[in-house]
Image: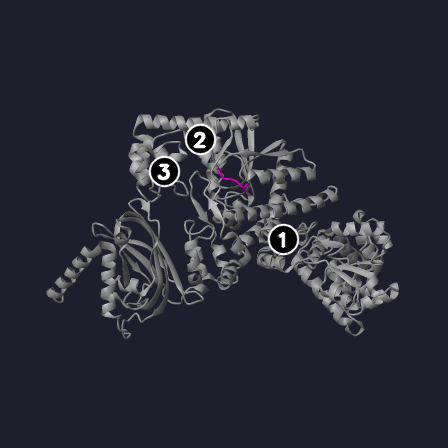
Amino acid sequence: MIVDRSCSVLSLDIFDTVLWRRVPRPTDVFALVGSRLRAAGRCPSWITDATFRRMRIAAEQQARDRRESWGREVSLFDIWREMPLEAFGNAMLEELVATEVDVEREITVVDLDIAQVVQLAKKHDVPLVLVSDTYFTEEHLRFLLDRQELGTLAQDARVFRSHQHGLDKASGLWEIVLAELGREPEQLVHIGDNEIADHEVPAELGIRTLHYQRIDEDFAATLDREREQLDPFGPHATHLDPQHGDLGLTSLRAKVLQSRPPGSDTAWRYGASVLGPVLTGFAEWAARWAHETGTPVLWCPMREGELLARLINDAAQARGWEVHARPLWLSRHVVTVAALDRFDEQSIADFLRKPYQPTVRQLLAMLHLRPGEVPALAGELDTVLDHGSPIIERVAVALTEAPHIRSYLAARVAATRDRLLAVLRDAGALDGPELTMVDLGWGGTIQYYLAQVLKTARTGVTPNGLYLATDYRSTRVYLAGLRAEGYLAQAGHPHEVAATLSRSPEVIEQCVNALCGSLVDFAEGGAPVLSTSSAAPSQDAQRRAVQDGIVEFQRHWNRYVNSAAGSWPDLTEAGRDRLGRILVAAHQAPAADEAALFGNWKHEDNLGSAVVTRILPEDLEPAIPYLSPNDLADLDMRDTFWPALIAAANPHLAAAVQAITAGHADPAMFEPCGKPFRSRLLHRSVDGRWQDGPSKRVRINHNGLSFARLSFDGGDTDLVSLVIPGRPAIVRIDWIEARLTAAGRQVSEPIRWDCAEDFAGLGYRDGRWLGANMVEFLSSDGAVILPLAARAGGPVTAAQITVGFAVLPQSMSRLAPRLPGGPAMSRVSARLRQEYRVRGATGVAVGAARVALRKLAGPA
C-alpha cells in the first residue's frame, strides 16, 4: 500500500508496535523504576520492587478515578502526584517523572520490522502520524522515539495522544485524528496491536487497519503455564534485571511466533518459543566461555553437534568473537566400549549394566563378537540382560572364563579405541592440551569415558565439558578431576531444573539430534558407522520443523544483537534462571497439542542396542482414565519417559498435576481419606514357596477409578497372588495385563484378563467372582490368583502386572451383607476352558478327576 500510494497517511500505534518493552508486562517497568530510585537513594530499602510496582499501579488508578467527571485520561505528572512524595526523600516531582521516563527509554526497543515500514514510507513520501493511548507528554514520546533505527520519525510525525485530547482511541480519539488531518477514513492505514483500540474501532469508521498482534492465543497459553515459574512477583519470584528487564524474551518470542512461515505447526512453535530461547542462551554462553578462555575451537559431539555447532558459530559471529564450533562424531556407546581396559568378571559385569537392557545377541554385536565365538551363550541369544537377573553374572563369566575369549575381546576393544583416536587426531581434536566439548549433558558419560580413553592412550589431552545441564550422575566426572560446567544446572543444582530435564530428556534430545541413526562404530577409514534410524518420515519432518523454529528464534535474537551495536544484553548470566524456568514449565505442563505431537515419537537408547521406545508408551494409553496425579509420580523410567505428557492427554488430570506443581494443591488432596490401603503382589516359586513382592498405595481419581502397576524379577515363578484393593470391597476389575519374561525371553504379547469368561476362570483367595467383571474381596488379604507359568508356557522369571479397577469399599468389620456369587455353571465352564487352553483335553480330564476327588472327600 505504501509503494503503490494506495494510502495517503500511515498511522502507527507506539507501544507494542513501534516500540516494545523488555518486560513480560508493561506494569513490570514500574518495578525497575523502584529499583532505580532505591539505587539512587531516593527510595527507602523497605519499599521492594514488588511493593513499588503495586503502589505505582494503584496511584494511576486513583489519578484516573479523580478525573472521572472530566474523562479518565491522565498525565504521568498526575499519577506521580498520587504517590507519597515524602517517602522518596522529598525529591522534586519532575525528577521522579524523569526517572520513570529514563527507565522507559532504556527498557523499550525499536521493532525492526516496523522500522523498515517507517523507512519505506519516508522513501515514498507517505506522511506518518502516531496515535497512542498514553500518559506520556509529547516531549516524553519524542525522547522515547529518538532512535537511530527510526531516522527522523520523532521530529517528522504528528502525534495524537489520549491525554492531550482527553479521549482514548476506543472513545473518540479517532474522530479527532480524522478531523484534524482533514482526510477521509479510507485514506488512512493504521498499524497497532490492540484488538479493540487499533483494529475494531477504527475499522468501524472506515479506516484500513492491520492488526499487529503481539501475543496470540497459543502463546498466551504458553505464558499461562509459565506464569507460576516466571512471574517476577509470584511464588517463584525471578527478579527482573534492573537494566534489561526480562532481556526481551517475552516480547521477542511473541514476535518470532507472529512471523512464522505459512504451514508452521506445533513443532515449529515449540522450537521457536521454548527450545529456541534456551538454546540461543546456551550457545551464547558456550561461545563467550571460549572467547574469554582463549579456546579457539569447541567440539560438539554428534548427533546433537550439527545443530549446536551452527548455533554457537552464529552466536559468536553476532558478538564478534573469534570462536569456532565443529561437529565431532562421538557417542556414549563408542567411548564406553573404547574405555574398557580390564577384562575380569566384575569389570565386564559393570559394563553390562546399561540403563536399557539389550539382549545377549545385541551385546555381542556391540562388542564385535559373533555368537559362535562365545558358544556358551548360544542358547541365551534372545535373553534380556535384566539388572535383577543372574543372567548378567553368567554372561560376564562366559566372556571372561576362557583366555582366548578375553584376548579376542581385548583385541576388539583395542581396535575400537584405535579407530576412535584416529578420528580425533584427523579432526584436530587432539592438537592441544584440552579438548572442550559442548553437549546437552545430563550425566557427562562421554566426557568421563573419553578421559579414560585418552589417559589409556597417553595422549596428554584432557576433555572439558560445557553442558546445558548436568545431574547428580555427573559427580563421578568431578571426582575424576575433570572440568564440567552446566548452563542451566550443574551436578543436580538447582534441583528442579536438573531433576526435570534428567527425568524426561528424550524429547529435547530428539529435537536437537541430526536426522540420522546413532554412532555405533567407525570404519577403518574413519567414516562413522551409524545405526538405522527408527524414526518415521513424519517424525523426521516434525523434528526438522522444531529445529527450524530454534534457528528462527536465534536469527531474530541476533538481528537485535547486530542492530544494538554492542548494547544488547546477552543470556550468559542474567537469562539462565529465566530460561531454566521456561524449560521446566514446558516439561511439567505440556499442552494437549504437544502431547499429541511428541507422544508418537520413538526414542533410541543410543547405547549400541536396538532398543526403541515410544515417548508415550502404548500400554499406558488405556490407563490414562485410571490415573491420579500421584500415580504419575510413581511411574519410573521403565514405565514412561515423560509422565507429564500422559497427563496432558486428559484435561482434568493435567489440571491436577499443574495445581500440584505450582504449589496450589497438596498432593494429599488426591489421596483417599482414612487409612491408606495397598495393592500387593505375592509370587510363588515352582517349589511352592510364596514370596512377598512390591506394593502400591490404592488411589481413587476424579473418575472414581484406580490403577496399579507392580513388577518383580528373579527366580522361577508359576503363580501370582494379586491383592487389588487391600481391604474388604466389591471391585470392578476392568482389565489385568501381564508382561512376562519366561526362560529368559520376553513373551512377545502381553497376557490380558478383561472379560467375564476370563475372571470366571481365575482362582480367588478370600474372595469370589460375582459375575461379569465384579469380584468381592472379604479381607485385606483377598486376592485374585494369576496362573502366569501356565499362560506363558513355562516358569516366569520377571513380570509386570497392571490392573485398572474401581472400588466400592465394604466395612472392615466384615458384617456387611454378602452378595450372591456368579453362576456356578459359568465358573465351571470357564475353568474347563482355562484347562483346555493350557493343557488340552488331558488337562480337562485331570481337572475333572481332581474335582471328583474333592467331592468324595467331603468338607474339610
| Residue 454 seen from this side | no
At x 76%, y 64%, the residue is: 79
What x and y, as percent, mark residue 556? Answer: 68, 47
The residue sitting at 85% across, 65% down in the picture is 184
**Numbered disc 3: secondary structure:** helix
Crowd around label 1: few <14 · some 14–19 · many ≥20 (10 Å): few
Badge 1 is on which residue?
263
Alpha carbon separation for disc pair 3 and 1: 45 Å
The three-letter code of the residue at mark 1 reads: Gly
Q: Nearer the viewer, mark 3 or mark 1?
A: 1
Residue 597 image offset from top left, x and y in percent: 53, 53
Q: Which is more toward the observer, 154 or 56?
A: 154
Q: Which colour scheme is used?
A: one colour
At label 2, the amino acid type is Ala
- Is residue 570 found left or right of 799 in the rendered image? right
Q: Residue 361 carries which label?
A: 3
Whichever of labels 2 and 1 marks the residue nearer the N terminus, that label is 1
Tag in front: 2 or 1: 1
Query: Which numbered disc flags the more N-terminal residue, 3 or 1?
Result: 1
Quadrant where the image shows the N terminus: bottom right
Q: Is the magenta stretch mostly helix, strand or loop?
A: loop
Q: Which residue occupies 53% across, 46% down?
A: 537
Task: Give the magenta-colored segment's residue range.
Answer: 513-518
- Above or below, 756 against 455 in this view is below
- Mark 2 and mark 3 in contact? Answer it, CB < 8 Å: no
Total labels drawn:
3
Residue under label 2? 338
**Is residue 675 rendered magenta in the image?**
no
Q: In this view, does 265 lie above or below 807?
A: above
